[in-house]
Image (cartoon, grey):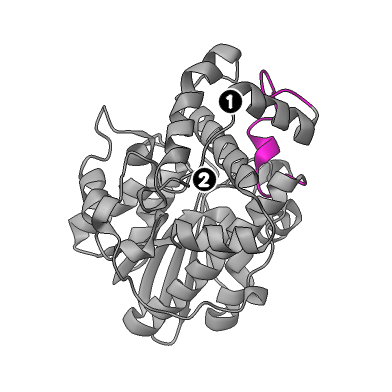
Amino acid sequence: MKKGRLWVMVVGLVMEASVHAGPAFTLPDENRVLESSVELERKTEPWCPGDCAVAVPFVASYRKGAERLVFVGAHHDFNPNAPTMRAVKEGFAEIQAKVVILEGFPTAMGENPPPLVEGARRHGAPDADEYGRGEGMYAASTALMRGIPFLGGEPTREEQKQVLKAKGFADSDIAFGYLAGGLSQALRSHDIPDTSVTSLEKFYPRVVQDLKLPMNEGGWALDAPSLEQFRQRYRQLYGVDIVGDKEFPLRVDVAFDNTRNGQQARVDMKTRDRHLLGLIEQQLSEKHSVLVVFGGSHWATLSTAIEERLGKPKVTPFLK
């Protein structure tokens, strides 16, 4: 599975009243963020096999003057022995970071938000949910052990929705994209073994529940179509039923998806990447030494802007 669209803010880590003013910064011009595509990833990540159909985590290390940035390009994983986890470990070894920026929760939650601290301390626990088993919480737990504060690198749901609405996407578009992403995540994290009717009927109510959550709890406060209506829209977009589709979840990956759903994903990704770039630059100016752990596709879209500030990086891919 390609890096692609992320399952931002899994409901297992509820924000509730934790959102407050995070670090203030100015959003960079959107023209500084490249649009995600498989061609871009093939160009920026020449080490990935199969024309980048197979994700390879990596560590990109930058230094210019007093500023130091290490960007761990993750392939979202839940196996403690996976290459992504080794890349995260190497990222910490590369830099004496003053702050760690993580994917999956808003900057507005502030440094070391309590729900995420609790999740980090449970990283690797047998009953941890998929987010708690992933590389984000591994990085957060490592940061806590080293006394390094961590921040979320995401905009708020309200900010994301505002941009999507301004670009002409309706609630039904947003709902479908979230549901497809949730099912993709479930398949990658092995919460479902396949996209059979039995698996979908079992898991679909969960992503529906997450979709309906208030936006300050990681949902979109939206109603969901029935599973049959979701399957019908999937067929309209992709020409096949999601049931038994061997190309899912790659088909809904932001770098590969040329449907309206893919267009929406790219708009949302640019919103997220503008926020991330602004945060990275603000933290570099203030703290000078920054570690970022994010999906590798986000590095691809930001690579030119980062290089303009810090020069070319030393890149170490983790092929195995």
Q: Quadrant of the N terminus?
A: top right
Q: Is residue 84 left or right of residue 306?
A: left
Q: Which is more toward the observer, 267 or 283?
A: 267
User: What is the span of residues highlighted in magenta in the rendered image?
Assistant: 240-258
Q: Is residue 47 left or right of residue 318?
A: right
Q: Amino acid at mark 2?
A: His
Mark 1 = which residue? Answer: 226
Residue lying at 25% horizontally and 44% vertically, measured from the top left: 119
Which residue type carries mark 1? Ser
Does residue 160 appear left or right of residue 243 in this picture?
Answer: left
Q: Which residue is mark 2?
A: 75
The structure residue drawn at horizontal position 30% and vertical position 45%, both measured from the top left corner, is: 14
Q: Which mark is residue 236?
A: none
Query: Residue drawn at (59%, 31%), measured in percent from left and top?
Result: 225
Principal secondary structure, stretch drawn in magenta: loop
Q: Are marks 1 and 2 in contact (CB under 8 Å)?
A: no
Q: Number of numbered discs present? A: 2
Residue 306, given in percent of the width and then of the height, sits at: 55, 75
Residue at the extreme bottom: 65
